[in-house]
Image (cartoon, rainbow, N blue to C red):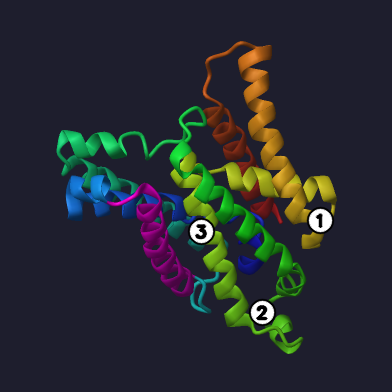
Amino acid sequence: FQTITHNRILTPSLMGFDVLYVLVSSLALVLWGSEYAESWPLELRFIVEVAVMVAIAVLLFRWLFTDSVRGLHVLILLGMVGGLLFRELAELALRLLDPSEFSIQQGSGTANFNRINLQLLSVSLVGVVVCGALLFRLRRHLDVLSLGRDVAINLGVPYTKIVTQLMLLICVLVSISTALVGPMLFFGLLVANLAYWLTGSHQHRWTLPASVLAGIVCLVGGQVVFEHLFQSGLPLAMVIELCGGVLFIALLLRGVKQ
């Protein structure tokens, strides 16, 4: 996502994509009620919600990242406002549900690594492996895209086609992570910048595996440290969001100085 947007601050979560998935899931319950949750298999509901979320997210991406909207601060502002709007709409949708339907979606708007949806684990694993393999296959195109839109087109990259494919993969991965643990605002920003720091390179054959490694270390290592070393009941998601928020402010301040 940072490669096709050409900056190291924007992430799908900062643009509100994860909260958009929560909104789609909540609206589906409002429109079809408890029959939707009871009669449809969970995996099928997940696939339908991902498809709707992907379609909306691709349209939003094409609208936001046009030649008329280029300023980083404008994009961050739009992303923050969009995320807040999606979150408030999702909460409004939850208030329209009856108690039995509300219990299905309760807690979906907050991240919790101790409340993983195990029913979706198998289909999510397949989705992550397939998307990861496709992303790694496109690593050379990503290296060219990082040079800029005009350079990529001049070098023969089918820009619109590749960017659309990447957005589809990104939206699926965001949907999977949100469905399993809930929305995380700054985790992607933290992991991406850790990958840049670990590799010292912008070549995607290094940064993609490094980001996966950084994510595993942050989640598994953080859980082990807090639960077994410090024996603390502090939620890991809160600590990650705090560290990511500090990094976000630091990157913004550095950008202003430059």
Specify the amino acid type for callout 3.
Val
The magenta stretch spans which residues? 40-64
Q: Place residue 216 in its image quadrant.
A: top right
Judged from the image, the secondary structure of the residue bearing numbered disc 2 is helix
Residue with the mark numbered 2 = 149
Q: Position of residue 62 (x, y in %)?
A: 47, 74
Whether tag 1 and tag 3 are in contact, CB under 8 A, the answer is: no
Q: Position of residue 148 (x, y in %)?
A: 70, 75
Q: Nearer the viewer, mark 1 or mark 3?
A: 3
User: Residue drawn 70% across and 73% down?
Assistant: 145
What numbered label is drawn on residue 115?
none
Quarter placement of the C terminus: bottom right
Q: CA distance from mark 1 to mark 2?
A: 22 Å
Q: Give the mark nearest the N terminus, 1 or 2.
A: 2
User: Residue drawn 66% across and 54% down?
Assistant: 255
Q: Give the mark nearest the N terminus, 1 or 3.
A: 3
Residue with the mark numbered 3 = 172
Quarter placement of the N terminus: bottom right
User: Residue drawn 59% across and 68% down?
Assistant: 166
Q: CA distance from mark 1 to mark 3?
A: 22 Å
What numbered label is drawn on residue 206?
1
Q: Nearer the viewer, mark 3 or mark 2?
A: 3
Q: Is residue 88 above or below residue 149?
A: above
Question: Is residue 53 part of the magenta span, yes or no?
Answer: yes
Q: CA distance from mark 3 to mark 2?
A: 24 Å
User: Residue drawn 62% across and 34% down?
Assistant: 243
